[in-house]
Amino acid sequence: MLRSVGKSLWLLLFAVVLVCGIYPGILWGIGQTLWPFQVNGSILKGPDGKAVGSLLIAQPFTKDEYFWPRPSAASYDGTASSSSALAVSNYALRYRVAQAIGPIAAYAAGPKQGQLVAPDIETWFQADKFGGKPGIVAQWADAHNSIAQTWVTGDPTHTAYVAAWAKAHPQIVAEFVKANPATPHPQPSDLAVVFFEHFSKDHPGMFPSSVTHKGPNGKDVTEIMPVKSGSDIQANFFDMWRQDHPDVALQNVPGDYVTTSGSGLDPDITLANAEFQLDRVAGKWAQDLKRDPKQVKQEIGGLLKQYAFSPGSGWFGAPIVNVLQVNLALRNRYGAPS
């Protein structure tokens, strides 16, 4: 009995040393010798020699001087990798995509070919009619209840604004409670649709948006105020504008510019996506450097071609570029954005 136990323990010890020590050690040695960059996480370093990120995991870029990665349902958090899991039929997906397209959509034909649609969205919005009926904001809230609630809860200033509105309109809140007895003490999010319906009546052709201005003490103050133009209107009401203008030809937008990847951490974008962003990136660098936009665009376009590659030598998809890699190349070439 003891002899069998002893042999078993020796076998266990041998297996542990082999599988948990010798084998991993051999692989580690081979990796560190032949592929040290890859086995250490494909980490890139900035001009100061400090690590700036991995080629394998996307990170957010928001400055106009840089190329932007795909949207991320995981907020670019490597510990929370996930897709949005929204079906094509889900209006939340359509709405999110429309929000991304609104400020950058351009006409594909006609007298305004190449021009942005955004100014026309604002003009249409200010007329305050959708489908021939007045009250665009009220119709938006009625059609997108969860989106209206997200607007209220997504920003503390929005929540405080609706809470203050509720205190100033007790009769409206009382009518809501009467119609919804299961919610005797409504929170700001519960009142989202009611708030937007009454806002639409009080401020036709306007939308509540954050506005920053100088306060009495000279410091910047951000308040929610009715606005009739700006990115909030271009983004939130593009889908409704499109429904009112179904026959207008618009330029195509690369799919990966507005859709998330399965992991939410895809570090690459298609070359078509990068070229779609080229005018913005080159224009901002030209402005920062006070140089000819055409020349800067040509230089950055050359960088894109230099760093573009096709998976499997072109067998497995369209040419792509690594966002971190090309943005680091821009940083090394032009310095830090102003």
Image (cartoon, rainbow, N blue to C red):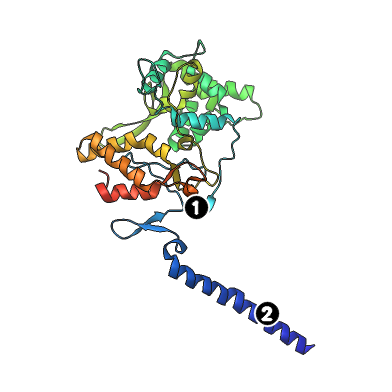
Nearer to the camera, 100 or 253: 253
Q: In terms of image quadrants, where is residue 22?
A: bottom right
Q: Amino acid at mark 2?
A: Leu
User: Residue 287 location in percent, x, y?
Assistant: 23, 36
Label 1 neighbourhood size at 10 Å, few (<14), some (14-19), many (20+)? some
User: Residue 73 location in percent, x, y?
Assistant: 52, 42
Task: Count the marks.
Answer: 2
Say which residue appears at 46% left-offset and 30% top-offset: 99
Between disc 1 and disc 2, whose residue precedes?
Answer: 2
Determine whether, in the image, residue 222 is placed left or right of residue 164: left
Q: Which residue is mark 1?
A: 78
- Res. 316 in view: yes
User: Residue 333 location in percent, x, y?
Assistant: 26, 49
- Res. 189 in view: no
- Per the image, label 2 sits on a secondary structure element best described as helix
Q: Which residue is mark 2?
A: 12
User: Residue 248 location in percent, x, y?
Assistant: 45, 17
Nearer to the camera, 87 or 312: 312
Query: In the orientation shown, which residue stands out farthest toward the right?
Result: 1
